[in-house]
């Protein structure tokens, strides 16, 4: 995977999806599950979008940039929600989401990996 120009973003998205899955499972075991409803929903959305982004980057899809932009937005939403809760699984998830959002923005932004891949394939 090291030869993939998206390797660091793929790793961050994979780690984030796993952290979100862990958070969902732990939230469902909390005493007040109802209080965790938004967290659980955003965790599920974030994990699915992260996995979609991984697939798009692995295939060097022309949609990878758009998907990663959306992924960064949802990661921010999930991180903000998880950060509101004191449980360690939520704090760990928030950190993974923030790292993923940063990597997705770095990959898809001006001068990011996507720009380098596009210009390399144009030659």
Image: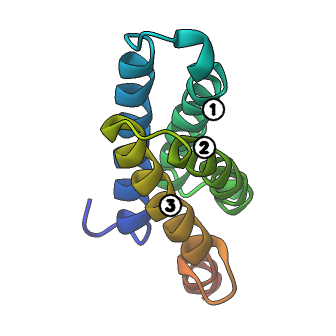
Please tell me whether mark 2 sits on a helix, a strand or a loop. helix
Residue at x 67% of width, y 79% of height: 109
Q: Name the residue tied to disc 3.
A: 98
Q: Are marks 3 and 2 in contact (CB under 8 Å)?
A: no
Q: Name the residue tied to disc 1.
A: 42
Q: CA distance from mark 3 to mark 1?
A: 14 Å
Q: Residues within 10 Å of mark 2 (few under 14, many from 20)?
A: many
Q: Is residue 123 above or below residue 34?
A: below
Residue at x 40% of width, y 29% of height: 23
The label on residue 78 is 2
Quadrant position of the C terminus in the picture: bottom right
Sequence-wise, which precedes: disc 1 or disc 2? 1
Q: Is residue 29 left or right of residue 103?
A: left
Q: Are marks 1 and 2 in contact (CB under 8 Å)?
A: yes
Residue 34's x, y, as percent?
Answer: 61, 11
Of all residues, the one furthest to the left in this rendering is 2
Determine which quarter of the picture holds residue 81: top right
Q: Is residue 53 above or below residue 119?
A: above
């Amino acid at each position: 995977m090291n030869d993939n120009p998206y390797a660091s973003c793929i790793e961050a998205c994979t780690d984030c999806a796993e952290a979100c899955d862990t958070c969902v499972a732990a939230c469902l075991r909390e005493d007040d599950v109802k209080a965790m409803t938004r967290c659980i929903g955003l965790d599920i959305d974030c994990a699915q979008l992260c996995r979609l982004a991984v697939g798009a980057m692995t295939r060097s899809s022309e949609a990878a940039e758009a998907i990663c932009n959306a992924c960064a937005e949802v990661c921010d939403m999930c991180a903000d929600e998880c950060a509101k809760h004191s449980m360690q699984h939520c704090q760990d998830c928030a950190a993974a989401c923030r790292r993923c959002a940063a990597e997705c923005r770095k990959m898809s932004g001006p001068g990011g990996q996507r720009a380098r891949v596009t210009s390399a394939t144009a030659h």
